[in-house]
Amino acid sequence: MEIKSASFVTSYAKPGDFPAPALMEIAVAGKSNVGKSSFINGMTRQKKLAKTSQKPGKTRLVNYFLLNGAFYLVDLPGYGFAQVSKAEKERWGEMMEGYLKGSENLRHMFLLMDIRHSPTRDDETMLRYVRILNIPFTVILTKADKVAKSKVPMRVNALMKELVLPGREWLIPFSSETGFGRDRVLARMEEVLSS
Ligand code: GTP
Ligand code: MG
């Protein structure tokens, strides 16, 4: 498939605001600064669709992007950002839980992790949660341009083992800078949307 159109639809600050079921959703989650918003821009080839930032904690709301008029990519607020208040962390938890438990149209999650690093505790918690809720997922290994191309397969293997995933097809190395991995993500989207 190709992405023919993409537009920002709306943001939600709390679960009660989430929209009534309409179209299929694919969520994008991961720790703060891992490259979620850049992933959305890279996939849609629109540099400024989702706001990115060098400073973590940019995306604080649940943002809905409509793709091909057919499904939503949902940019979730990043976790593991130390410099937020306890109240903000609680709000984050409620929002995430509200979204993940409440969204009837959620078909898949792209769980983003930095290809260079081991999963954090928060990553493991997120993965556990997704598994408990039975949400199908793919791990996207972001910033693949930051490691030598020859090292990419090694990092995929290492993370596959650390996350106890059954096969390499569960992880897709990706770079929003070079477009590396974009075709595989598109193919995965197509699978998800047609199943
Ligand atoms: P929050 O909204 O704070 O949770 O962050 P985010 O996960 O949306 O991250 P964002 O897309 O804003 O990117 C964070 C930083 O990483 C920015 O400086 C991006 O330019 C950079 N970045 C993201 N993806 C890539 C990538 O594939 N390669 C490189 N080299 N840098 C990237
Ligand atoms: Mg963001």
Image (cartoon, helix red, strand yellow):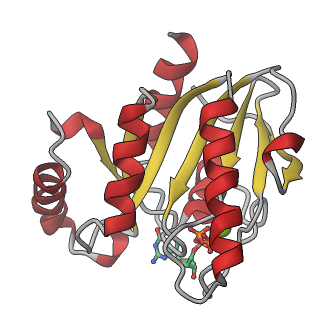
Decide if residue 43 is on the left or right side of residue 129: right
Identify whether 108 is placed above or below 110.
Answer: above
Instruction: Relative to 76, say whether 7 is above or below.
Output: above
Q: How many marks?
A: 0
Residue ID at (42%, 28%): 136
Residue 183 lies in what quarter of the image? Answer: top left
At x 61%, y 45%, the residue is 97
* Residue at image coords 68%, 42%: 98
- Residue 3: x %, y % from top left: 67, 36
Identify the image quadrant of the N terminus.
Answer: top right
Residue 118 appears left or right of 74: left
> What x and y, as percent, mark residue 14?
82, 52
Whole-percent x, y for residue 9 in the image:
89, 44
Q: Is residue 57 left or right of residue 167?
A: right
Q: Is residue 57 visible?
A: yes
Q: Nearer the viewer, residue 25 or 100?
A: 100
Looking at this view, name the residue that lies furthest to the top. Answer: 195
- Residue in the foreground of this view, choosing between 149 and 72: 72
Above or below, comparing residue 165 to residue 61 in the picture: above
In the rendered image, which quarter is residue 142 located in?
Answer: bottom left
- Considering only vertical position in the picture, is 173 above or below 144? above
**Percent coordinates x, y for residue 178 in the rendering:** 46, 64
Q: Residue at x 58, y 66 (%)?
A: 78
| Quarter of the displayed picture in which ligand 1 can be seen | bottom right
Instruction: Residue 180: tell me if it is visible.
Output: no
Q: As rendered, which of 159 and 128 lies closer to the eye?
A: 128
